[in-house]
Each structure stands twice: as C-alpha cells, then as structure tokens.
Amino acid sequence: MIEPADRIKQLPPYLFVEIDRKIREVREKGMDVIKLGIGDPDTSTPEYVIERMVQEVRDPKNHSYPPDEGLHDFKEAVAQYYRERHNVKLDPGAEVLPLIGSKEGIAHVHFAFVNPGDINLVPDPGYPVYGIGTLFAGGESYRMPLREENDYFPDLEGIPEEVLEKAKLLFINYPNNPTGAVATPEFLERVVAFARKNNILICHDAAYSELAFDGFRPMSLLEVEGARDVGIEFNSLSKTFNMTGWRIGYAVGNGEALEALSRFKTNIDSGFFQAVQYAGVEALTNPRRDSFIEELQHLYQERRDVVADGLKKMGWNISPPKASFYFWAPVPEGYTSQSFVSKVLEETGVVVTPGSGFGKYGEGYFRIALTVEVSRLKEAMSRLGEAISF
C-alpha cells in the first residue's frame, strides 16, 4: 500500500465521524434523534431561484465550460448586492471573484500566498479550514484565542513580534462560527490598522452576514475605510439563501489579492456550472430577495428565543446571539466537551457539537445549531432539561 502524504497524516480526525457513529448506535436502540450539530439550513432554497435554475439547465449555452474568471452577470450581481446591502461599490471585473462555495476559496487562498515557514493568524475556536489550509500550503498556524471575556475578539496586540514578522494572512469570521459573536465597527477598524501596519492580508469569512436579529445589521469588512487595500471578504449563498448544496460563493475586495487567488484557481479547476451562476444572479437580484432574507431572520430569531429560554431555565446564563444560527455554551462542571456531548446524545438523543472540535480554546464549550423547526427545538430543550443538572 502506498503511504499517504505527510500532510494527510497530520490531519485531525473529522469532527463529525465519531458523532455519526454514536448517532447510529442510539438509533439502533430505537431512540429518536434530534440533530443540532451541523449548521446546514433545513428550509428550502427560494422558489424563484429554483425556477431560474430549471430554466438555465435547459439552455444548451450553459452546457459548456464556464468562463475561467466566472460569469460576468454573476459578478455584476454580487457588486449590486454589496452596493444595496452595504453601500460598498465594487468593480465587478477586478474586485469580485466567483467561488465553488466560500469554503473552496478559503482553502485555496493559502496556496496563493503562503510559502513554507510563513505564519497565518488563525482564530481558535474557529472554522477548521483556516488551519487545515495553512497546513496544506506548508505554513504554520498561530492560534489566536477567542475568549468570552474579550467578546470573542482576538488579542491582536498580544501577538509576539517574531510571529508578526512571518505573518501572511489574518483570518477573522463575524458573525462568528462557532461562538455567534459579532464584530463592532471599532474592532474592524483596529483589524484594518493592524493589517496595514504589519503588511498582512485580512481574510474575512462573512458567511453568516445576513443571519442577524433584533434589527442588528452585521458590517462588511469593506465598509471600513481602507479595508480593500489590505483585505478580502469571503461570502456565500449557502446560509443566506439556503443553498449549501449548490456550492456557490464569492470573494470580494483587494483586486491584486483576488487576481492571485484566481490564477491559482484557473490552474486547478474549471469554474462551476454556469446554470448555478445564473441561479445565483437570481438569488442576489430578484425583487423578492429582501423579503426572503427578512423571513429567514424571523425564522431563526424565533428558534434562537426558544433555545435561549430553554437554556436559561436549565441554569445557563447566556446572552442570546445577535447573529448567526449558533449558540455557544459552557459545559457543566465535571465534563469535557466530548464527554458532555456523548452524555447528551446517549441519554437524550439530542446531537450537539463539542467545542473542542473547533480548536484548543473551544474545550469546555458546546455548540447548538438552530437548524430544526421550533417544535423539535422545544422537544430538544425539554429532553436536555430532564437529563442535565448543575
């Protein structure tokens, strides 16, 4: 048997493999499972997007290779969306890059910028791809702790000088997965000043930018003066339009950075199905867009309130998140993240995610995803209340 590459051997076990095994075990015992683990929307893609997709699939013009740089109409739609939702003007030709989902772009940006020995500044807890992409590109990750007492912002001023001398990319993610934290204008301004001072490229993962509650509006990084000089922003149609399976996203911002990422991409992929890009145009520009987003926000806000009330009754004192569809909560005393998640699954059939799966500093926490209907969330909270005591 040929040995896999060292980079593959260094990969941590996939977070949900063990969870899936335990789910199978409890189901075999006849237990009803409520899955609050993976953040995958449970409601449908908008009908107007589906209708456009059906139309475009039937058109032979879409059956060939798409343009390497992405469909111009889709790039125009992204620019229009940013102008209308964030008051940010983008050059569609130079400052918008279509992606096969934002995860693809986040993984590949490392290969466009990172040399062996370079350091990336990676939030912990955080989306695992930030660190795994760094590993694959031959770089090193400097883990920036996101602590509750610091509002889940990284301590940029505490990063050692010897790290900054080798730092290439700074990853931030707000609204945040897994903590649900949101960025303030002051924090984003500090990030831009920090990146400019240290010649670092900001990579902002904004996948949850439209999942906000109580009238709160998450900012785009590009709303900060000077941000596009030192940063790019990744976004996706996955969470905003319930299109996780469609694999469509984009990066916007610094034109030179996007050109480098585009050069890498054109050598390893051939873009993505043109019909999907036209469906993306429809999602971003259809007159029903804003009402769909508002309905989605109301849906998740109702679910958030159900979980907030349930956790409060059980003894957790947690401020409900202003955005994202996640709750981040400490495990009761005497448990690790993994042992608590296992206990909950085995005794209640409720699946939650161990915080340790998001990094060293996620230990001691667990994550709840608001991706089941209200009645199931109420049932999950009821089961947890019967099984857990502080």
Image (tube, helix red, strand yellow):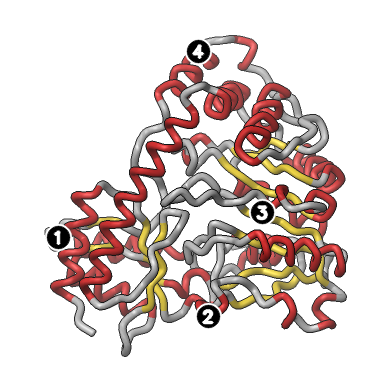
Q: In this rendering, which labeled residue sits more in front, label 1 or label 4?
A: 4
Residue identifier under label 1: 31
| On screen, residue 76 above or below 166 | above
Residue that carries the numbered disc 3 in the rendered image: 107
Q: Amino acid at mark 4?
A: Gln
Gap between marks 3 and 1, in whole Å? 37 Å
Compared to residue 348, the image places residue 215 above or below, namely above
**Mark 3–mark 2 distance (CA, rounded to whole Å):** 30 Å
- Name the residue: 44% across, 17% down: 51
Mark carried by residue 149: 2
Q: Which kind of residue does numbered mark 2 sit on?
A: Glu
In this view, the residue farthest toward the bottom is: 334
Disc 3 residue type (three-letter): Ala
Amino acid type at mark 1: Met
Which mark is first along the chain, 2 or 4? Answer: 4
Which of the numbered marks, if any, corresponds to residue 55? 4
Q: For the image shown, how many numbered marks are present on the structure?
A: 4
Q: Residue at x 65, y 59 (%)?
A: 185
Residue 296 quadrant: top left
Label 2 crowd bin: few (<14), some (14–19), many (20+), radius 10 Å: few
Q: Is residue 65 left or right of residue 238?
A: right
Identify which residue, 174 or 367, lies in the foreground. Answer: 174
Q: Secondary structure at mark 3?
A: helix
Residue 378 x/y as whole percent = 19, 57
The residue depicted at 34 percent of the width and 38 percent of the height is: 43
In percent of width and height, residue 131 lies at 64, 66
Q: Nearer the viewer, residue 61 or 37?
A: 37
Q: Residues within 10 Å of mark 1 (few under 14, many from 20)?
A: some
Residue drawn at x 25%, y 78% as measured from the top left: 315
